[in-house]
Amino acid sequence: MLLAPDDVYAGFVVIRLISAGDSAALYLASQPETGTPVALKVFDLDVSSDTVFRRRVQNAVDLVSTIHDPAVAAIVDFGRERGQLWIATEYVDGLDTGQLLREKYPSGLPRRAIDVIAHNGAAALDRAHRRGLVHGGIAPGNILLGDPFSKEYRIVLTDFGQYRGADRDVSPSAPYTAPEELSGADATAQGDQFAFAATLFHLLTGHVPFPDNRRVITDSGHLHFDAAGLPAGLAGMFERAFAFDPRDRFATCGEFAAALTGSADAAAQIPPAPTSRLPAASPVATVERPTEVASPKTAAATDRTGRSVGFIAAAAVVAVIAMTAALVIFNKPKPVAAPANNAAPSAPAPGAQGAPPACARLHTLVSQMPLRQKLAQLLMVGVTDIFDARAVVNTYDVGGIFIGSGTDKSMLTDGSLRALKGAGQLPLAVSVDEEGGRVQRLSNPNLLGSQPSARDLVTQYSSEQVRQIASERGQKMHDWGITIDFAPVVDVTDAPPDSVIGDRSFSADPQKVIEYAGAYANGLRDAGLLPVLKHFPGHGRADGDSHKGGVTTPRLDSLKQLDLVPYAELLKTQSPVGVMVGHMEVPGLTNDLQASMSPAAYSLLRDGSYGGPAFNGLVFTDDLSQMRAITDNYTVPDAAQTALQAGADVALWSSTDQVPAVLDQLETAVSSKQLDVGRVDDALRHVAVSKDPTLAC
């Protein structure tokens, strides 16, 4: 459903709809605090649930946020809302080249205007390629022309990385897409050269080079195109740009632009973007394999308010576009900020224009952190005492430690745990299993003392009293330096008290579980702890104990009727909160895999198909080293890798001795592309925000 003017979405106030397609809608919106206009793109649920697409967009957002190129639309913010992916970029007040073509020059733009667009667009693409950023969907609508009478008139590229491999043949950019990418290959710099050439061909002639998506190869190896309206002498140049083999195309977009305009050194006349603090770039090789999009290790913050526009061509040529675009732009509605309570919009605070945009700190942290440190942040390991804890944190930068039954608890009372800090850029997470009843790691009278089981809490106390109990115990844990409690259990069962879940469950009635587990979680959160709901998608009716071997739950459709109801309700109101995924096979969902090892189980949670909201919080595995449902089939390194690949954010186990082996295996998995670096970065974002909520978008 489309948003209406004055709707608030992801913190932005919608002003008007700009355009709507099959997979996304684009709105002019404003930031309420400043009234600054943004271009807000909201993807539909189908696209938003595509994990590969989300990771691709996230990689592009990370890279765009570090490039600071005035010719690339800046990212203002990014996230998911109501299950839908959205991106807010700077609003370029003008029009795109597709509009200019349709509304003013249907037979083709003036040649000098083509030259300006070609040179500036090519220079921006080549700069992006040298930083590892590939567009993947270049079309006339992605080339924006700023207001021609603005002091900072710009030609800007937008929508990097926003393509879907499976749907390329039906996407708006299909007439421009390279044949290998239409066949399913990932985007590359040479694919961008093809698409950029096809876009310029359309702007030049008024028609697309390939009227349908069939690509006919000629004897010379290039793709046959309709040359009607093409100026004399350019056919051979476009034949090279449209070569079927990417290695036969121009080496760079700048080389193509120089050939198009007949100036061998034309591209060299365009200065690089004013980002002198960026590292020197290496040339992009002409390769057949897809270009890997990797996050750079360094990124310099840049104040965008003082940027130069040195890459714009001579004023006389700019005037050509200015005159051709002016009539269209003057008829286009101008952005109007949406003031709160009908008041006049307030001016930005002094210095606000130079402040980093929302999400920038998070994107910078993720893109700059070394890979091994990223991987270490995704581990939570049990420790024996403060010396063990210090060693694993200071030596390996692990992101979290676990206080178990065998841990020397003096580290809590003597202040040494509180003094232990994370070795990296993020605070250390400290967790414990403190449910009450049979699962209490801190029940020593000198610590927390005993608490009734979940089932007994329901019979003895009101839900408000349970919240107070959890808050008081949570406050003591918080004072010792604990940050996470793996509680409450939200499994639904009436099994005997001493069975694997038994009295750890609040009730066999989902509504009673919702009431009391919600109260317990609120109490922990009141104390400053992160509560963790467990064991997703439901251990209450499993046919055994996953500590002792493999177990199977009822079918997924049955879980949705009972076991998943507490998650569906609690995740609507509980925030922040974590979820622990259990080691159960779920017929109709995980096949022969445990849920903790199953991509389908994590997708169920993330996309909301379990019956509740799409969950974007922190997801833990259950213990990977002490439960035979896992240890009968996996080593700890194998289990950690498989779980992270499947969608877990944090791999949990109960000792430190396997940490070096796990990190080594995970690094190897990333380098061999068994573990996607985008998946690692996605998990790291969840970890980072859970530790430092100010990083949240």
Image (tube, rainbow, N blue to C red):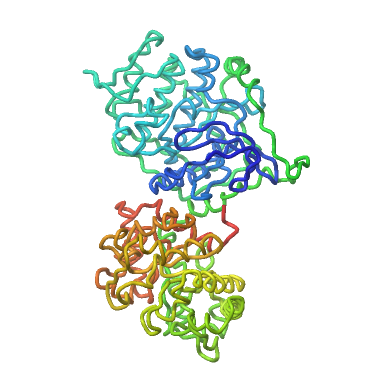
Q: x, y (%) of residue 52?
A: 38, 46
Which residue sits furthest right? Answer: 343
- Residue at image position (48%, 61%) is 568
Asked which quadrant contains residue 692, the reply is bottom right
Report the side of 409 relative to 549 (left or right): right
Which residue sits furthest top? Answer: 232
- Residue at image position (59%, 74%) is 523
Q: Tell me: residue 427, above or below residue 330.
A: below
Viewer-side residue, 519 vs 49:
519
Report the side of 662 relative to 66 (left or right): left
Q: x, y (%) of residue 617?
A: 49, 60
Q: Tell me: residue 428, above or below residue 228.
A: below
Q: Tell me: residue 512, above or below residue 206.
A: below
Report the side of 662 relative to 446 (left or right): left
Q: x, y (%) of residue 609?
A: 42, 54
Asked which quadrant contains residue 317, the reply is top right
- Is residue 480 visible in this depiction of the protein? no
Q: What is the number of callouts on the image?
A: 0
Q: x, y (%) of residue 56?
A: 41, 44
- Is residue 390 visible in this depiction of the protein? yes
Viewer-side residue, 152 vs 625:
625
Which residue sits furthest bottom? Answer: 445
Q: Tell me: residue 231, above or below residue 673.
A: above
